[in-house]
Image: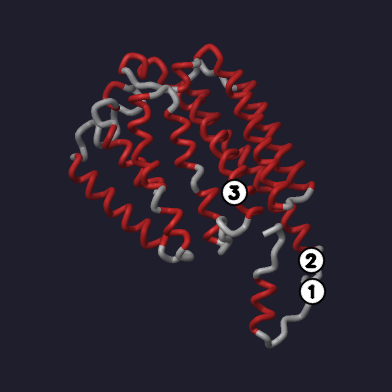
C-alpha cells in the first residue's frame, strides 16, 4: 500500500513535481512513464495488496478498505491546506488500527483495545507530522514558488517549537497507549523515555536550513526513535512472557492446550 500511495501521489503531482528540484526527475514528472502506465501499475499494486489483506482475518478487510480514501486524498490536501502532513499522518498511521484485527482483537467489542488503538494511532500521527515537517523543509523554497502548501511553509519561523510540541504529544500518547494496554515499566521507561530523548536530540540538532541535514535526520531519526521504542516494547514483552505461569510448562498432547500457550495474552486484551 505504501507503494500504491507513492504512485498515486506522483500521478497527482506530475505537473507540480517538475518545479521542485528534489522531485523533478521522478519517472512520471520527467515523462519516462506515462500516466496510463502509472495507473495500470497502481492497479497491480492495489490488487497485490488486496491479496495480502485477504490472508488476514476478515475484519481486516472492513478496516483496510477505508484507508484507500486516505491514500488518495493526501496529494489533494497539499493543494487546499497548509497541513497535508496531517492527512499523511492519518494515512501512514492506519497500521496502528489494522494491527488489532490482524491479531484477532475486535476493537468494537473490546474497550481496552479500542482505547489503546486510539492513543497509538494519535501518537503515530504526531510522529508522522513531526518527521514530515522536517522533510518538507527540504523543498520549502521550491514549494513557495510552485504554490504547494505545507506545514513547514506555513510555520517556518516556529518550526522547532511545533516539532517540540509534536514530540511531547507523541511520547505522551504512546505512554497512554501503553497504560491502556497494560504495558509495564520497561515500556514506559525504555520506549517512551527513549523516544523522548532521541526526539529531543534530533529537534535540537537538525539544521532546518540545510537540505542535507534535514534529509539525514528524516532518514535516520525515525530509525533511532523507532529503534528505542521497539527495544523497550520487546523487553517489556519478554519480561512479562517469562513471568507468565505458562512458561516452562510441558506441552501436552491436547491441541487446545498448545493453542492456549501460543496465544498467551501479555496485554489487557
* Location of the C terminus (image quadrant): bottom right
Labels 2 and 1 touching (C-beta < 8 A): no
Using the numbered discs, state the Cα–Cα distance from disc 2 to disc 1 in whole angstroms: 9 Å
Identify whether 114 is placed above or below 11. below
* Rendered residue at 26%/49% (across/down): 41
Q: Residues within 10 Å of mark 1 (few under 14, many from 20)?
A: few
Identified at 55% across, 29% down, the residue is 130
The Cα atoms of the two marked residues, 3 and 1, are separated by 31 Å
- What is the quadrant of residue 159 in the picture? top right
Q: Which residue is mark 3?
A: 117
Whole-number angstrom distance, CA of label 2 to CA of label 3: 24 Å
Give left or right: position of 107 versus 180: left
Sequence order check, earlier mark of 3 and 1: 3
> Residue 236 at what x, y percent from top left?
74, 53
Q: In the displayed structure, does residue 206 sit left or right of residue 267?
A: left
Judge from the rendering whether residue 132 lies leftward or rightward of residue 169; answer left or right.
left
Q: Is residue 65 above or below residue 213?
A: below
Viewer-proximal residue, 59 or 232? Answer: 59
Disc 2 target residue: 244
What residue does disc 1 label?
Answer: 248
Relative to 45, say whether 123 is above or below.
above
* Earlier sequence position, callout 2 versus callout 3: 3
| Left or right, residue 145 beside residue 220 | left
- Residue 6 or residue 114, whichever sits in front: 114
- Using the rendered view, name the quadrant where residue 109 is placed: bottom right
Residue in the image at 63% along x and 43% along y: 227
Residue 162 location in percent, x, y?
58, 21
Amino acid at each position: 500500500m505504501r507503494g500504491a500511495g507513492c504512485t498515486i501521489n506522483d500521478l497527482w503531482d506530475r505537473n507540480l513535481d517538475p518545479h521542485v528540484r528534489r522531485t523533478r526527475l521522478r519517472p512520471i514528472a520527467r515523462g519516462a512513464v506515462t500516466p496510463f502506465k502509472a495507473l495500470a501499475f497502481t492497479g497491480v499494486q492495489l490488487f497485490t495488496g488486496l491479496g495480502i489483506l485477504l490472508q488476514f482475518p476478515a475484519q481486516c478487510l472492513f478496516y483496510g478498505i477505508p484507508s484507500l480514501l486516505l491514500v488518495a486524498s493526501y496529494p489533494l490536501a497539499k493543494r487546499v491546506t497548509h497541513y497535508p502532513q496531517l492527512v499523511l499522518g492519518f494515512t501512514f498511521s492506519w497500521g496502528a488500527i489494522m494491527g488489532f484485527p490482524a491479531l484477532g482483537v475486535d476493537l468494537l467489542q473490546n474497550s481496552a483495545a479500542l482505547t489503546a488503538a486510539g492513543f497509538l494511532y494519535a501518537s503515530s500521527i504526531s510522529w508522522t507530522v513531526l518527521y514530515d515537517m522536517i522533510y518538507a523543509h527540504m523543498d520549502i523554497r521550491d514549494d513557495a514558488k510552485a504554490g504547494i502548501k505545507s506545514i513547514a511553509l506555513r510555520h517556518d519561523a516556529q518550526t522547532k517549537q511545533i516539532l517540540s510540541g509534536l514530540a511531547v504529544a507523541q511520547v505522551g500518547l504512546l505512554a497512554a497507549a501503553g497504560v491502556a494496554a497494560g504495558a509495564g515499566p520497561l515500556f514506559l521507561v525504555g520506549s517512551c523515555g527513549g523516544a523522548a530523548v532521541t526526539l529531543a536530540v534530533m529537534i535540537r540538532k537538525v539544521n532546518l536550513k540545510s537540505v542535507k541535514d534535514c534529509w539525514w535526520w528524516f532518514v535516520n531519526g525515525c530509525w533511532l526513535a523507532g529503534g528505542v521504542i521497539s527495544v523497550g516494547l520487546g523487553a517489556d514483552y519478554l519480561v512479562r512472557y517469562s513471568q507468565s505461569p505458562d512458561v516452562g510448562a510441558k506441552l501436552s498432547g491436547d491441541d487446545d492446550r498448545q493453542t492456549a500457550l501460543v496465544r498467551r495474552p501479555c496485554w489487557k486484551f
